[in-house]
Amino acid sequence: MEVLESKRCLFCDELVKVKRKGGNEWYIDCMCAPGGSYGLQEDSYEPYRLLSYSEKRNSFPILSAYIREQTDCDEKVVLTYEDRETILQSPQIPITTEEKGNRLLRYLHRHTGGPGEPVVINQFSQSYNLTYSLNLQELVFITEKLKEEGYIERIGSTFKLTEKGWVEAANTASGKALKPCYVLLSGIDEKGSRDWLETVFPRLIQLGYAPKFLEEDLSLRHDPKPIEALLQEVGNCKLFVADVTNPNAELWLRAGFAIGNEIPIIWTSQVADQQLPQGVRPHIWQDVEDLVKVLQKVLTKE
């Protein structure tokens, strides 16, 4: 049985088990690589250790964050001393608060299947490397900012991406801007809405759209903006998905506004025989898997 020695990780200062292999020291399950490991070239340990206090304070949290992000993305990490400057000067390292916040959104996105799914961040007080932050205070500031802006929900160490946060994470991870898309479901219950969120929305994101539910009943909104301003939101989108399974007047109002602004509309319904306005020919679906296939077929033809 292989005997592992204990050694302190330079970058997160945690005492962990270390395995020596192929000229590298492999640090196992420290805060740089929770549940995994990373390699450090053996002859690089001393040069890193001999850096000044100020150099360590400003660079080690960034290197720890780099290791954590890469290993969390299933990338193998083996560091040398020469890698230090390359990593610190890389344009991929986030600098602004917004960029750092996006790294937390991406982390939550990788660990969930859809918005509203909880993620527990163990040892949260030591996890500021999730946002490339230099300390816990910066991490807390970033998480509170994301919460205030409606991207996440947080109770203690349990985090959830909101619908807005899920789309933003997918958007920034893809490296390209997603086209705004509004979805209006009329007469579909909470479970049905959840099915759309978990199955249909991810596919729309893959197809290049940023989906968002529209409020079904304009009269029930607490938003102080007038109805005209709310309708104008539709005018800014690039795709409108309207499910007419159980349509109401407000659905037709929104859809009519979209038609008037020459916005492409995809009509869907779970009912085959309906009395619908001329020109409205919905794609019939039985379950959300059918619907995903329909959207894939329609949108890839464009």
Image (cartoon, grey):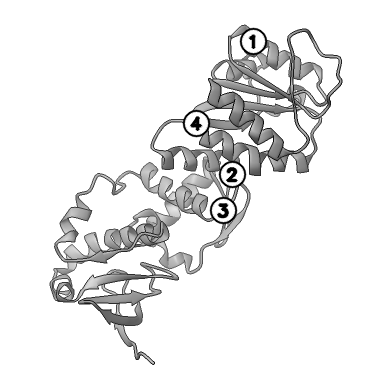
Q: Name the element at disc 3.
A: loop
The Cα–Cα distance between marks 2 and 4, rounded to whole angstroms, is 19 Å
Nearest the viewer among 86 and 125 is: 86
Q: Which residue is mark 1?
A: 259
Q: Which residue is mark 3?
A: 112
Residue 134 seen in this snapshot: no
The Cα–Cα distance between marks 3 and 2, rounded to whole angstroms, is 11 Å
| Structural crowding at the residue carrying mark 1, measured as other residues with C-alpha within 10 Å and reported as few (<14), some (14–19) or many (≥20) | some
Q: Position of residue 248 (x, y in %)?
A: 81, 20
Give the left or right position of residue 130, taking residue 166 as reference. Answer: left
The Cα–Cα distance between marks 2 and 1, rounded to whole angstroms, is 29 Å
The Cα–Cα distance between marks 4 and 3, rounded to whole angstroms, is 20 Å
Q: Which residue is mark 2?
A: 162
Q: Name the element at disc 1.
A: helix
Nearest the viewer among 202 and 165 is: 202
Q: Which residue is mark 4?
A: 208
Q: Amino acid at mark 2?
A: Thr
Q: Residue at x 81, y 26 (%)?
A: 245
Q: Is tag 3's residue or tag 1's residue first in the polypeptide sequence?
A: 3
Give the left or right position of residue 30, taking residue 21 as reference. Answer: right
